[in-house]
Every structure is written in structure tokens, then in C-alpha cells.
Amino acid sequence: MKNIAVIGAGTMGNGIAHTFAQFNYNVQLIDISETALEKGIYTISKNLDRMVAKEKITQEDKAQTLNNITTYTSIKEGVKNTSLVVEAATENSNLKAKIFRELDEVCDHETILATNTSSISITQIAAETNRPDKVIGMHFMNPVPIMKLVEIIRGYNTSDEVTNFIVDLSKKINKIPVEVNDYPGFVANRILMPMINESIETLYNGVAGVSEIDTVMKLGMAHPMGPLQLADFIGLDVCLSILQVMYDGFKNPKYAPCPLLVNMVMAGKLGVKSGEGFYDYSESRKADKVAKMFA
């Protein structure tokens, strides 16, 4: 396998494309927006520049990585001659269902279809296709080029062959795959999101301020980033979507999103990507925060 398609040029998509391309896979990066593709390639280039500055890679490595990526605005064209497609679109079940129905139609029958979903049932996504045995979850962590973990989630019908293949592939791109079962939120977000939500509740109830809550968790619990800052980095809209998936899936009030989170998302306060969340982010400060993640 040398040709891999990645759907979505946003934060996760361009990070996944960057990672595969850096390990000399031919990546076909797909997004309906030419602007998003240009922004994605720009982000990859800047992140590679930081790696060059830290002497983790050479200028030649950077050039080869970028040369390994081709962009497309058409799924049908972008998935040609690929053995694996990794979907990294917005965390929206209806959108993912639509994408997987189209992928099932236009991809070769042997092509493996993976999703980077952070909470939605793999079995549910696979049911949109005629190849449920070849659908699997491949949940990367952000920032993808740096974080080692990949959650591997098999749906009810995912084959052993496909699962083993994806586990081996993850190791080839220097990731550590961990296989988990197909329940809402899987492991990472089933544990993380209630903590973030409770941190927002703590703020909402006036127990402490933003910096105080984050400082307690950083200094008291040895977390590298406070939960509210982490929520900003993830995207408050993404946090809300994941909590809603878990609330709908488990029917348990402990997963109900805090009203403050709901209101902030409705107001467009999404965190780093919108310039404001629990913290205020100027463009320069935003760049500095991302740069530190690659330090």
C-alpha cells in the first residue's frame, strides 16, 4: 500500500496527510473547498518548517513530504487507485454517513474505509456501506504528527484481517495503536470529555475562574494543559458534538453538555480556531501555542 486518500483538509485531516506523507506514502488529500486545501498545505508546510528548525528533519525531507501530497476537490477523483481512505471530516454523523455512502460507490471493492471519528459508532458508519467488514475506526490524536496514540476501533463486522492491517500500518508511521471496542466516545473521549464538561460546570457554578481551574489541574494533577485550555485547542464545537453523541448513546445525564458550553458554541466562541473561547487568542498568540506543541 502506497496510495492513501485523506478526506478533509482541516486540523485532523492535514495532520493525518502530513504524517503519512512524511513516511513516504502517496497521499491524495481531498476537500470540497480549494481554499481549505490551500490552507491545509500551508499548515503542513509551516509545521514541517518547525521540524526543520528543531533539526528533526532536513529541508530535503520537507520537500519530499510536500511532494508526496496531491490535492483534489472531488472524492471520486481523489480516491482513484487507493488502498485506504481515511475520513477526517467534521464530527457529524449525517455528514459521515453521506461520505461513506459515496465512498462505497466510487472506491474499489477491496479498498479499506477508515474514519477518524472521535465518538461516533463504527458499526453505524459501516452500515452505510456494502463492505462493513472493511470499515474501521482510526482515531488519531491532535496534533497528529506529534501524538503517538491511534485508537483502533473495529465495528461489529470489521474483519480480523482489516484490523490487523491497520494496526500494522499505524506502527509503520511510528504510532502506537491501541485497539478498543465500539462504544460512544471509545476510551479517550469517554474519559476526557466528562472531565472537560465538569471543568466547564465548575466554572459555570462559580467555584473558580478559568486560569484557576486550569492551574489546579496542571500543578495538582500533572496535566500538561488545563482542561479548559485543552477544550479551546480541541474546539468547543467538537467537544459539544462528542458529548451529545455520548449522551444520546448512553442516555446518562452525566454526559449532558453544560449549558455554558452550549451557549458558547451558539455564540461562535469555539476556542483557538475562532480566536476566542475560554481564552482570548490573537493570531500571534495562536501561532505561538501551536508552535509549542511541535517544540
Image (cartoon, helix red, strand yellow):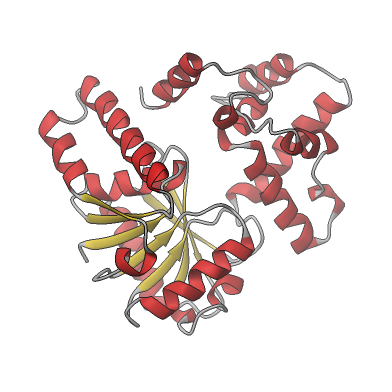
Q: Position of residue 213 (x, y in %)?
A: 73, 20
Q: Is residue 28 or residue 23 the one in the foreground?
A: 28
Q: Is residue 14 positioned above or below 109 on the image?
A: above
Q: Residue most toward the right?
A: 205
- The quadrant of the rendering that contains the C terminus is top left
Residue 153 shows up from this direction: yes
Q: Position of residue 252 (x, y in %)?
A: 84, 56
Q: Position of residue 120 (x, y in %)?
A: 62, 61
Q: Would you say 13 lies left or right of 257 here?
A: left
Query: Looking at the image, which residue is at 48% across and 85% down?
Result: 130
- The quadrant of the rendering that contains the N terminus is bottom left
Residue 174 shows up from this direction: no
Q: Would you say 13 lies left or right of 235 here?
A: left
Query: What is the number of callouts on the image?
Result: 0
Q: Would you say 197 lies left or right of 41 here?
A: right
Q: Is residue 125 positioned above or below 26 on the image?
A: below
